[in-house]
Amino acid sequence: MKVKKAVLPVAGLGTRFIPATKAMAKEMLTVVDKPIIQYAVEEAFDAGVEQIIFVTGRGKKALEDHFDRSYELETMLKAKGKTDLLRQVNELVPETGTIVYTRQHDPLGLGHAIWCARDIVGDEPFAVLLADDMIQTPDKPVLSKMVEKFERFRASIAAVMEVEKDQTDKYGILDASPLEEDMVKINDMVEKPKPEDAPSNLAIVGRYILTPKIWEYLGKKKTGAGGEIQLTDAMKGLLTEQPIFGYKFKGTRFDCGDKVGFQMANLSFSLERPEMREKLLDFIKKIKTEA
C-alpha cells in the first residue's frame, strides 16, 4: 500500500499564457529560477515517490529534455569550473526508469489524462499532482503530509481548501463532515457548481492519492462539466464503494495556470530566498509608495 508512483498530467496547451507558450510547454514557465514542473517533481520525490509518470501531448519536448542529460552544457560547465551549476544540472536527471512518458492523444479532460497512465501505474495506489497548483507550506510539502495520512486511513485522499463562495464554479466542491483538525470525510462532490448550487466552499486542489479502484470509474469515460471526462465524477463513483477523505493543508496555493496567480507565486517564492528578500521588499515599498 505504499505510494510509489505519481501521475503528472502535462498535456495542456497553456493558452492563457500565449504568446509565451506558443512554442514552449506551459510547465516550463519559471517561478524564480525553476520551471513549474520541477517543483511538482521535487514534491513527489520528497514524499517517497519512486516513479514519475508524465502524461504529455504534442510540443512537450522541452519538458522531456529538462529531465535528461545535456552533455554539451555539462562539458562547458565543467571546463569553466562552474561546479555548483554543474551539480544543479546533474541533480535534475533521475535514475533511468524513474521518469516515464505516455501520451494523451485527445484533450478529453483531467480524468482521461490520468486514465492514460493506467497500464503504467497498475494495481497499486498512486499520487496525482497538478503542476499548475503550487502550494507554499510552512513545513513539509503537501504530498508528504498526504502520504502520512494515507498510511493511516488506507483510502483515497484529496487536498482541500476553502475558496470564496463566488469561485465555486472553478473547482470540484465538497459536501464533507469534519473528522480531525485537518481532515474531513467526503460525503459527496460536485464539479464546478454555480455558487447558489454549491454544497459548501470547500474545494479540491491539485494533489490526490487514489486507490486503484478509481480505474474502474475512469474507464467508464463518462463526460461531465465542460463535456470532459472529469476526475471528480470518477471519485464520486468511487465514493459508493470506498471512503474518500480530504486533507486541509496549511499553506498558500497559487494557481499558476492564471497570469495573476503565476506572478503572485513568483513574488512569494522569491521572498523565501534570503539573497533576494531585502531587495524585493525595498522595491515593493517603493512601488507601493509611488502607486
Image (cartoon, rainbow, N blue to C red):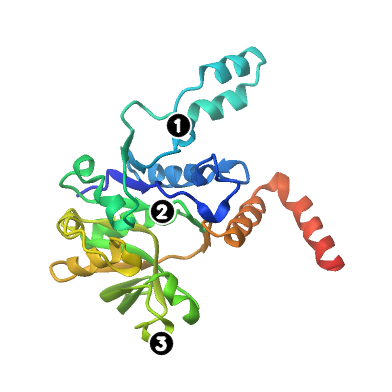
What mark, if any, has residue 267 been given in the picture? none
**Left or right of 122 in this view: 201:** right
Residue at mark 2 to residue at mark 1: CA–CA distance: 18 Å
Residue 196 got which mark?
3
Helix, strand or loop at label 3? It is helix
Q: Amino acid at mark 3?
A: Glu
Q: What residue occupies the far right of the structure in this picture?
A: 290
Q: Which residue is mark 1?
A: 67
| Marks 3 & 1, CB-CB < 8 Å contact | no
Residue closest to the eye, 261 or 179: 261
The answer for how far apart the CA atoms under marks 3 and 2 are is 27 Å
Q: Amino acid at mark 2?
A: Leu
| Mark 3 or 1, nearer chain start | 1
Q: Is residue 117 above or below residue 289?
A: above
Q: Please name whichever residue, 159 or 139, is drawn nearer the observer in this view of the structure.
A: 159
Q: For mark 2, what is the residue? A: 130
Mark 3 to mark 1 CA distance (whole Å): 45 Å
Q: Is residue 203 above or below residue 57?
A: below
